[in-house]
Amino acid sequence: MEKERNSFTGSIGFVLAAAGSAVGLGNIWRFPYLAARDGGGLFLVVYLVLALTFGFALLMSEVAIGRMTRQSPLTAYGKLSKKFKPLGIIACIVPMLIMPYYCVIGGWVVKYFLAFLTGSGVSTAQDGYFTGFITDTSSPVGMTIVFLFLTMIVVLGGVDKGIERFSKVIMPLLVVLIIVISGFALSISHTDELGNVRTGFDGLKVLVIPDFTGLTVKGFFTVLMDAMGQLFYSLSIAMGIMIAYGSYMRDEDNMSKSVGQIEIFDTAIAFLAGVMVIPAVYVFMGREGMESSGPGLMFVSLPMVFEKMGSAGNFIGALFFALVLFAALTSSVSILEAIVSSFMDQFHMTRVKATLIEGVIALAFGLLVCLGYNKLYFEVTLPNGAVAQILDIMDYVSNNLLMPIVAIFTCILVGWVTGPEKIIGEITKNGEKFGRRGLFIVMVKFVAPIMLVVLLLKAVGII
């Protein structure tokens, strides 16, 4: 058992680790799709406003809870109020549900990265390649183990020598890669069968220029809910992650400034992900090519785009999947750390024991997810109308049900039980200014809980 709680060596370590958690698959395969579908610049404006208000209030609350209690998500809520101890259990279940299928998807990324790295990326663009891979009974399992092993190695290194050191190397590389690929995406052009020329800048217009065509009140409500749901992915809120990372933040670091930097970093990366993906897909596949999201976008549409790039396609594909692998690893590390820190605090385990136990649990459920595409394949219809199998069910329960519940009760705890002044006191205890103090109070007490309830009702199909 660690006698003293580890901490990041400085604010830059905390910001990079937290930003690394925020920059994950959700930014790369979900944000571009939603932006293209929901009116381009309209979605961007709505997302930015929500990030600076709704997302800011939840992110600040979780980081402050972590630093104030010096506890993991499993135990932090109970330390603030005994009545909220069950909320800590739910907050710990969320990353435990996400970890297995995230490692499976991470394994898919490893597979594609190796394919492009070895010069055989063209094969991934063939019809049925992705389906053939995920329905195989052995290859996805092996790749899942590789990804899980890489994640565990970082977490076993501890907070400063593992997570922080890893983030300080990977995050700058990630930024460089996304800028390079975005620049390339803007520079390309293509002439289709009808002689129409599409350029990368034409695709950029789809992303940044608001499209109000046929916009209704119901349509704007959909954009609002999509943007709010995306914030959970983008900012890693309601997963217990920011509480765990907040507990490693030094008392002398400026929390308000650090959270602001995380907001800026995450929003910039999300936008660049759109610049990286939408122009490239638009140039070679038109607007219809942007209708895919999730695995369909990353593992089917984009390999087709890389194939059409000719000789440069394999190289750009290798850079792209290296970028995705880095983003996936920084997020999976944070997910695993939220669980490991919870085990350590609640059961007084060593870091090694906690990591190995969760590794076994994640692998066991990860195998179920892999088998869900072949031997254990079945389909059910979720309350929101989506047709799902094992991975989708785990994603729906964690992201659509449990995360809004965690966020709602976090707002109730901060806004009405302990009172927002207690959190504000933690934020400003070193004399730092808190410029969005009034906004924080209004959001955490009134606006955010109402919006979260609406999001939850939408997820269960009531509205």
Image (cartoon, rainbow, N blue to C red):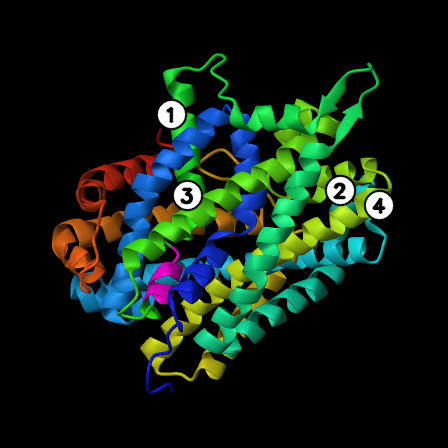
- Measured as percent of width and height from the top left, residue 454 is found at 31, 34
Q: Is residue 392 part of the magenta span, yes or no?
A: no
Q: Are marks 2 and 3 in contact (CB under 8 Å)?
A: no
Question: Which mark is on residue 122?
Answer: 4
Of the numbered discs 1 and 2, the one sitting upstream in the chain is: 1
Image depth: mark 4 or mark 1 in front: 4
Q: Residues within 10 Å of mark 3 (few under 14, many from 20)?
A: many
In the displayed structure image, the side of residue 439 where residue 145 appears, left or right: right
User: Taking 13 as reference, is 254 left or right?
Assistant: left
Contact between labelled residues 4 and 2, with CB atoms less than 8 Å apart = no
What secondary structure is the magenta-colored segment mainly?
A: helix
Q: Is residue 277 left or right of residue 433?
A: right
Where residue 91 sits, quadrant-wise, is bottom left
Screen quadrant of the N terminus: bottom left
Q: Please name the residue that numbered disc 3 is placed on.
A: 231
Res 233 visible: no
Q: What amino acid is found at the position of numbered circle 1 in the picture?
A: Phe
User: Around disc 1, counting alpha carbons within 10 Å, would you say few (fewer than 14), some (14 to 19), or many (20 or more)?
Assistant: few
Residue at 83% across / 58% down in the picture?
A: 118
- The magenta segment is 239-246
Q: Amino acid at mark 4?
A: Val
- Label whose residue precedes the other's in the sequence (2 or 4): 4
Amino acid at the residue labelled 2: Pro
